[in-house]
Amino acid sequence: MPFSSKHPETIVLHAGHRRDSATNAVAVPIYQTTSYQFDDTAHAADLFALKKFGNIYTRIMNPTTDVLEQRLAALEGGVGALALSSGQAATAFSIQNIARTGDNIVSSTDLYGGTWNLFANTMKDMGIEVRFVDPDDPEAFARATDDKTRAYYAETLPNPKLKVFPIREVADIGRKLGVPLIMDNTSCPVLCRPLEHGAAIVVYSTTKYVGGHGTSIGGALIDGGNFDWEANAARFPGLNKPDPSYHGAIWTQAVKPLGPIAYIIKARTTLLRDLGSCMSPFNAFQFIQGMETLPLRMREHCRNAIAVADFLGKHSAVTKIYFPGVMTGEAKRRADAYLKGGYGALIGFEIKGGKEAGRKFIDSLQLFYHVANIGDARSLAIHPATTTHSQLSPEEQLATGVTDSYVRLSIGLEHIDDILGDLSQALEAAAPAKAAE
Ligand code: PLP
């Protein structure tokens, strides 16, 4: 950006790109290329030795993807970002970048079902233990920490419970013990900037609100540059000892002149190089398009969601509603402390009549899509117990907050009258007023 702005509305339109250096194009071009001609052998050698920054191969970097990365880093107030092929890849990389076989991380129980599976099964198979703790008790993170703990992990606004995570409280505990907090902020971009509250790394599934259009799967890591990996060298040998996979580079030293970017550079130059979960330039372009309207969309999502929460809260067929804006006590305090400009657009509710009524409700929707997604411009609904969380055991389902009668809504950008109209007719079909009394 030729000027600096702290406003998301400006950042999403201007950060990382003014005009294309080759053509003066204002829109970010799609550099649909695998490789880049080196000037000469010395240039090639310098790029590989990280003596110069430049394009080598699209698995590791790409000019279109670079703009998306710069925009995401600017939006979050971070020092660098890495775009990846999916949110799942971003979560996996966020941990694998600092944890090895024999290490552990401490994670909130309140997680997306896919993340739960990754942590409870695949990470376990990789020899990384994930210790799940209740986020209502921040001190539980401290109690679960030992010398082998490499990170804390949580979601800012985790569905299905939709209770905002105590970011500052847990980040502070981690900083005392030398453990970085990684926050998945997928559900509330713009509304929350976890790095400002002490988190060290932000994870996104860009598939959701960042894109908003529901056309592309993607993910990203953003490095806050605010965690002292060197001061905690014993915990992070991968960042502080010579890396045999990169001619003995010590990442915290190698990149020092460029800023506090050891974590994000290592993720790119080792994990992305070796595991190859890169974002395609076309998808990066799609996310850049989506991001241009992200702050605007989040405002409308939030506005519609408040109206839906109000409607559901008064409906006789609804027995319980999960929405940060209607919570009380500590949950509401956290929502107000960490979300600015709205409470997000995910709403959970329990319907009278349990599983059968939940199924009928979903089958009766006409405007809402029944899909395994959130954060689309369109309104979406799902019954987690039989879909997203179905691979979890009943105990695990309960720990993540899923009951048989729970329905999750992701409120879109349609006119609010149409959204309420569809909910109203589907509730009536599922739990008729007379039968419900
Ligand atoms: N994190 C959260 C909070 C999610 O909701 C999801 C997907 O639903 C993911 C991560 C995984 O993202 P992706 O589907 O892009 O792999």
Image (cartoon, rainbow, N blue to C red):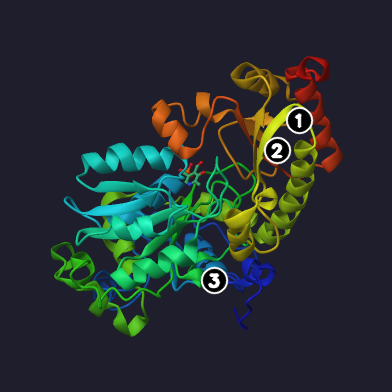
**In front of the other: 103 or 63:** 103
Question: Is residue 277 visible to us here?
Answer: no
Q: Amino acid at mark 2?
A: Ser
What is the quadrant of the N terminus in the image? Answer: bottom right
Mark 2 to mark 3 CA distance (whole Å) = 28 Å
Which residue is tagged 2?
A: 379
Residue 29 in percent (x, y) is at: 57, 60
Q: Is residue 7 left or right of residue 271?
A: right
Classify mark 1: helix, strand or loop.
Answer: loop
Picture quadrant of residue 188: bottom right
Classify mark 3: helix, strand or loop.
Answer: helix
Residue 355 in percent (x, y) is at: 59, 20
What is the quadrant of the C terminus in the image? Answer: top right
Asked if the residue under mark 1 is in contact with the one under mark 2, i.e. CB atoms within 8 Å, the reply is yes
Q: Which mark is residue 74?
A: 3
For label 3, count other residues whose C-alpha is less than 10 Å away and answer few (under 14), some (14-19) or many (20+). Answer: many
